[in-house]
Amino acid sequence: MKTISKVSLITILLALVSMTAVAQEPIGVIAKSSGTTFHKKFNADEYSPNAIMGTQLKNNDWIKTGDDGFVAIFFLDDKSQIKVKGNSEMEILAAVERGKISKTISLDYGTVKATVNKQKGEFRIVTPTSVASVKGTEWWVESDENGDIFIVVEGVVEVENLVSGTVQNVGQDETATSNPDGSVEVEETNDEDIPDDPDDDEEDEETGSTIHELRIRMVNDETNSEKFIIIEYAE
């Protein structure tokens, strides 16, 4: 019994250490920001105005956008991206599971685009109505009090309605509507329903623009080493 207790205690302590490490270490960075935006740190009670490009994001950080706001987030472990359009609010969550970092975007409301590279852990977007999980794909999520719309551009997304437990796989060029009554409907995507990507609009206007580099210094205190994350952007 004593041996079992010690093993259990060690397991719990290791789990706590892993969770603390994720909470303290940056998991993403704000790669682009425009319009009315806000950022709330994991240990803050209030939002700070302006989600500033280059800001490192940690577990339990929040992002919020106004009518004209836009924020692009770059995850450091796998280079996946989240683009947050106007009138949106979300929390970034991370957890260590079997040595792998799993990420969850808790979307209270609004519109986001996820470009997810191949995952070692899990990547999910959770709303009050649904949860969508993938291993690698590109898709849009629109969420409000009327439910959720999932537009898959590439790959496959598993959508679960949290009211009924109904699960549907949604493939490329398909759109799923997850409703508060528990129903999930899948149909072919109408191109006119795909939200505008602010980055696509900028690319059309970037003739003659200047390319800049954003260099983010990452320090590992345990190994006394450092590395730089380089993000290119046009102006």
Image (cartoon, rainbow, N blue to C red):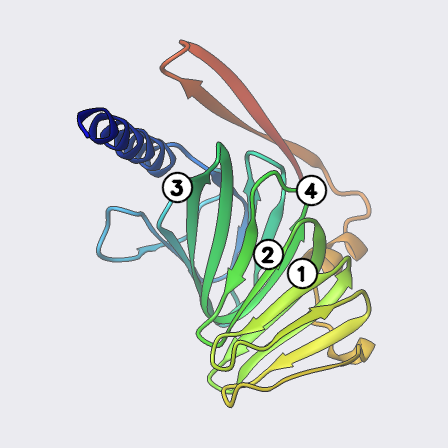
Which quarter of the figure has residue 150?
A: bottom right
Looking at the rendered image, the disc whose residue lies closer to the viewer, 3 or 4, is 4
Residue type of the residue flagged with mark 3 = Lys
Q: Which residue is mark 4?
A: 118
Q: Are marks 1 and 2 in contact (CB under 8 Å)?
A: yes
Give the crowd class for mark 2: few <14, some 14-19, many >=20 residues within 10 Å: many
**Tag shown at residue 198:** 1
Q: Are marks 4 and 1 in contact (CB under 8 Å)?
A: no
Looking at the rendered image, the disc whose residue lies closer to the viewer, 3 or 1, is 3
Mark 1 element type: helix
Residue type of the residue flagged with mark 2 = Lys
Mark nearer the N terminus (3 vs 1): 3
Mark nearer the N terminus (2 vs 4): 2
Q: Does residue 48 appear to the left or right of 154 in the view shown? A: left
Mark nearer the N terminus (3 vs 4): 3
Mark nearer the N terminus (1 vs 2): 2
Looking at the rendered image, the disc whose residue lies closer to the viewer, 4 or 1, is 4
Query: How far separated are the C-alphas under marks 3 and 1?
Result: 25 Å
Q: Does residue 230 appear to the left or right of 144 in the view shown? A: right
Residue drawn at (42%, 19%), measured in percent from left and top?
A: 219
Residue type of the residue flagged with mark 1 = Pro
